[in-house]
Image (tube, helix red, strand yellow):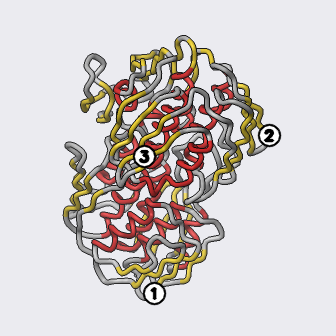
Amino acid sequence: MLRTLLCSERIGPVAGTVTITADAQHHMDKFIIRGGNRLSGSVAVSGAKNASLALMPATLLADGVCRLENTPRLRDITTMSTLLETMGVEVRHPGTIIELDTSNIRSYEAPYDLVKKMRASFYVLGPLLGRFGYAKVSYPGGCAWGPRPVDLHLKAMQKLGAEIEIEAGYVIAKADRLRGADISFDISSVGATGNALMAAVLAKGTTVIRNAATEPEITQLALFLQRMGAHIDGIGGNCLVIEGVETLHSANDKNIPDRIEAGTYLAAAAATGGEVRLERVDPSQLTVVLSKFREAGCEIETGEDHVTLRAPERLEAVNVTTAIYPGFPTDMQAQWMAMMAVAQGSTVVTDTVYFDRFNHVPELQRLGAHIDVTKNTAVIHGLDRLTGATVMSTDLRASASLLIAGLVAKGNTEVLRVYHIDRGYEAIELKLRDLGADIQRVDSEEY
């Protein structure tokens, strides 16, 4: 299997595209971190992973070439590209612009071996069904934690008039033409909102999506669909009204910055007592996160597209409860916990979005963190310092928390299974190194 993803050139200080011919099962990298360095300097935030993973399948809704600027080079983007290529989409991703040519789509199937790697692959269901009246999509995988059922997606498609069958682990959806419907989600779901939106734009009549997700990534998707000729009202709010059209046309778009990547670098700077300026970021998408950093004793300055954080010598303990946007993101929970492991006092972190998203806790404990977990709540008792150890990534955000903990730990920390972090962070070790971190990516024989 040939795959291309961005990792560091192991010799120089610049990132490059490296073609790796070994299968992921036979090739592993690890990070070696020598902790204790204070981060300082500036770092540019990449395009939003989760927005890209919605925009790319949206191109299936029209014939032609779409160009998406500010698309990061990540394992998840590579996986989505490969999936679309199996359907006949021609994908080119030479730099930060990805081009998708949907003129020759020949398959309406998303096979298990690709969907299992990444839940976002399920996003092809709505556009395939909306445009072609047929989709065969494997049940998803891609995350090591949490039951994240696709029932909401399927119910939305049924409301729009699709017949749904489950056969040998695949969802088979059929419809002559979808028809507008009133869809009300019990739970605000980003994935289900995106899928319903992409299905509804070509449906006959009016669709109303109530309790729609309001995340910036959904807003970005809706604006892109508008550029393609869709009629959507209420963008940015939790009630979307879609007037179906006969056809859409290809369009270009520029991706938003990745707010979770931004928050992760702020957390790394805060934990190390550093001072970091983020470039190419949208502070308005980080309002709640920035207020929590202020509570922890950090000075925050914001401009139109930049944020500067100055950390105190020791952070104050600050409780967080995750919530759907615009609340504190569940995708920042692990990084916050790593920061609070060296804060002054005790912190309570409650995750109301995913009740079992604490796989990083045993690994943080290996570094000396004092954390007690009961159900979906963790209590972190801040320590003066952590101590380096060998730890293992279990999922994308967990791996980010281990890097942050490693940066403040005394001695060496080895973080194994970094393919998790490559799913969602572009050249993270290079960006951290530019800020003064002592971190290296090396070959590992560990599995």
Residue at numbered disc 1: 206
Q: Is residue 103 visible?
A: yes
Disc with the residue nearer the chain's start (2 vs 1): 1
Looking at the picture, does residue 60 appear above or below residue 385? below
Q: Nearer the viewer, residue 73 or 237?
A: 237
Residue 114's label in the rendered image is: 3
Relative placement, left or right, of 360 versus 307 is right
> What's under tag 1, amino acid-wise?
Thr
Residue 7 quadrant: top left
> Given this view, does label 2 or label 3 mark the residue nearer the observer?
2
Relative placement, left or right, of 271 versus 57 is right
> Given this view, does label 2 or label 1 mark the residue nearer the observer?
2
Disc with the residue nearer the chain's start (2 vs 3): 3
Q: Quadrant of the N terminus?
A: top left
Residue 374's label in the rendered image is: 2
Contact between marks 3 and 1 (CB within 8 A): the answer is no
Separation of marks 3 and 1 at Cα, in angstroms: 33 Å
Looking at the picture, does residue 379 appear above or below residue 212? above
What is the crowding at mark 1: few (fewer than 14 residues within 10 Å), some, or many (at least 20)? some
Looking at the picture, does residue 425 appear above or below residue 351? above
Q: Nearer the viewer, residue 3 or 358?
A: 358
